[in-house]
Image (cartoon, rainbow, N blue to C red):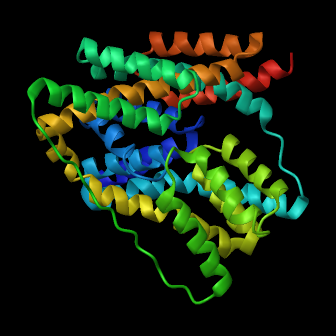
Amino acid sequence: MKSELKNIAQLFLKLGTFSFGGPAAHIAMMEDEIIKKRKWFSHQHFLDLIAATNLIPGPNSTEMVMHCGHERGGRKGLIVAGISFILPAVLITMAFAWFYKSYGSLPKVEVFINGIKPAVIAIMSISIYRLGSKALKSKLLGVLGGLTLIACLFGLNEISALFICGFTGLILFVFKRNRNSLFMFSPFILMNQLSNPDLLKVFVVFLKIGALLYGGGYVLFAFLDTELVSRGILSRADLINAVAVGQFTPGPILSTATFIGWQIAGFWGSVLATLGIFLPSFIFVLLLNPLVPKMRKSKEISAFLDAIGIAAVAIIAVVTIEMSRCVLVDWQSIFILLISFVLLLKFKNLNSAFIVLFGSFAGFILSLL
């Protein structure tokens, strides 16, 4: 068990260090490392976990990490995987927070990130093909996935799209089989008591956000604006810089909480903000993970999960398309994308972390031309 936990820690430390690009990109890299290379479990179960993760609040990719850790190492694996994935982003964000607090500005890393983005798009595109081929079990699911893709491209909220697609799949199945089903789960939130009122306030604010946050990390910024900026606890300029740090650091974008906690209450503020925002996810996944195999045994819930799964692949495709529109704006980014595709297709077992490193290096070199 110790060696297995060590393997889990090593894998998710690496993913946490190199997984740029947001939740969809993180899930694509997980699929490459966990399913394609290590074959820890099936593509179908991976899709089921994605579907289940979309049903609960919190950062989707971080909760997927916890699910995968639980599948491999039980409850200890869940905790080790979650901490290992979060830790690199937290430490890097702390360094940026200290630099910003000390010098009033952020270091310039744009040339490296500009190279990483097209490389990540290549990784996501390959993953969409692999996950989509497993999720596409019928023509009906293909139609549902296509409609979800189109609806999201025209502005439908991703959470609404997931649930509409999921319940449509369920309703069509029930109509076909003339059966009824009921699906409920009740996650509970753990709250700690802290003695320092200021630190307690920081912890409670981020615990509440972590427990209620749907829609991925990007929805976090609207919560922060309401909870902190509108109440005068944080300036909008600091929030904008926190958003920037979340965008160009690897790992979960919710590590933005680490940056903000430091601005509010120093080191311990960053620690408690980080603990508060991620703690609910550990609890939700711990409660939900054992239910996933039981959910798959029900034909009605299987229909719901299948529809959610194809919708999730469609949403990853939407994110990839939207990223491409913003990223592929010059010949340098297109060149990096094409070379990344060639490397991924020619060397099928190539570690995705090397593609990220290649993109970073290429972005720097091409910026000098």
Name the one closer to the observer, 190 or 94: 190
Query: In the image, what residue occupies the spot 78% across and 50% down?
Result: 240
Task: Please state the horizontal and vertical placement of residue 347, each as a whole percent of the image.
Answer: 45, 15
Name the one closer to the observer, 48 or 259: 48
Residue 42 seen anywhere in this rendered image of the structure: no
Residue 188 seen anywhere in this rendered image of the structure: yes
Q: Quadrant of residue 3?
A: bottom left
The reply, left or right, for residue 19 in relation to residue 10 is right
Q: Quadrant of residue 43?
A: top left
Task: Please state the horizontal and vertical placement of residue 219, each as a whole percent of the image.
Answer: 59, 47
The reply, left or right, for residue 325 in relation to residue 230 is left
The reply, left or right, for residue 277 in relation to residue 131 is right
Query: In the image, what residue occupies the spot 79% across and 69% down?
Result: 232
Name the one closer to the observer, 63 or 296: 296
Task: Please state the horizontal and vertical placement of residue 92, each as a whole percent of the image.
Answer: 66, 53
Task: Please state the horizontal and vertical placement of residue 206, each as a whole percent of the image.
Answer: 58, 66
Name the one closer to the observer, 79 or 224: 224
The reply, left or right, for residue 291 in relation to residue 26 is left
Residue furthest toward the bottom?
Answer: 195
